[in-house]
Amino acid sequence: MSGSEPGRIEIRSLRVVGTHGALPEERERPQPFELDIDLDLDTAPAAQSDGLADTVDYGAAVEAAAALVRSSSFALLEALAGALAGAMVALDERVEAAHVVVRKLRPPIPEDLGSVGVRVTRRRDRPAG
């Protein structure tokens, strides 16, 4: 980073239909998931230049996250959230860390429940030296 405090790109309430879950019926029937994604990065270059080339394109992050939810299948929310966070860090070398929340909006639980979810963080590995 350039010495300034890191900034954050926030993506909220991205809803994507996917096939994830531990129960057989969850593996057969697509269901809605909701994602919150935070990308930590140095926002100073973009703040100074006002140019998209100097930041991480949140549109590309949204598309990558949605594609992963649609094209993969995980038994656990922890695995899906970890894969999403890893994909966000790999998306652009300027992403220092990705914080991902995955919520299952229709969990197979017989109670009045809005959602269940998992939050994970992945940081970019830096070589020692």
Image (cartoon, rainbow, N blue to C red):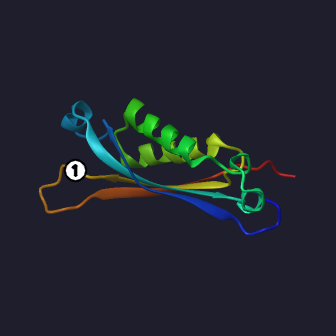
Q: Is residue 16 above or below residue 44?
A: above
Q: Position of residue 48 (x, y in %)?
A: 77, 61
10 Å crowding of disc 1: few (<14), some (14-19), many (20+)? few
Residue 90 vs residue 66, the one in the foreground: 66
Secondary structure category for the residue under label 1: loop
Q: Residue furthest bottom?
A: 5
Q: Is residue 61 left or right of residue 74?
A: right
Q: Is residue 22 left or right of residue 43?
A: left
The amino acid at mark 1 is: Arg
Q: Position of residue 97 (x, y in %)?
A: 63, 55
Which residue is located at x 79 percent, y 59 percent?
1
Q: Residue furthest right?
A: 129
Q: Residue furthest front?
A: 50
Q: Position of residue 92 (x, y in %)?
A: 67, 43
Which residue is located at x 77 percent, y 58 percent?
45
Residue 94 vs residue 58, the one in the foreground: 58
Q: Position of residue 82 (x, y in %)?
A: 49, 47
Q: Which residue is mark 1?
A: 106
Q: Residue furthest left?
A: 110
Total numbered circles = 1
Which residue is located at x 54 percent, y 44 percent?
59
Which residue is located at x 19 percent, y 62 percent?
113
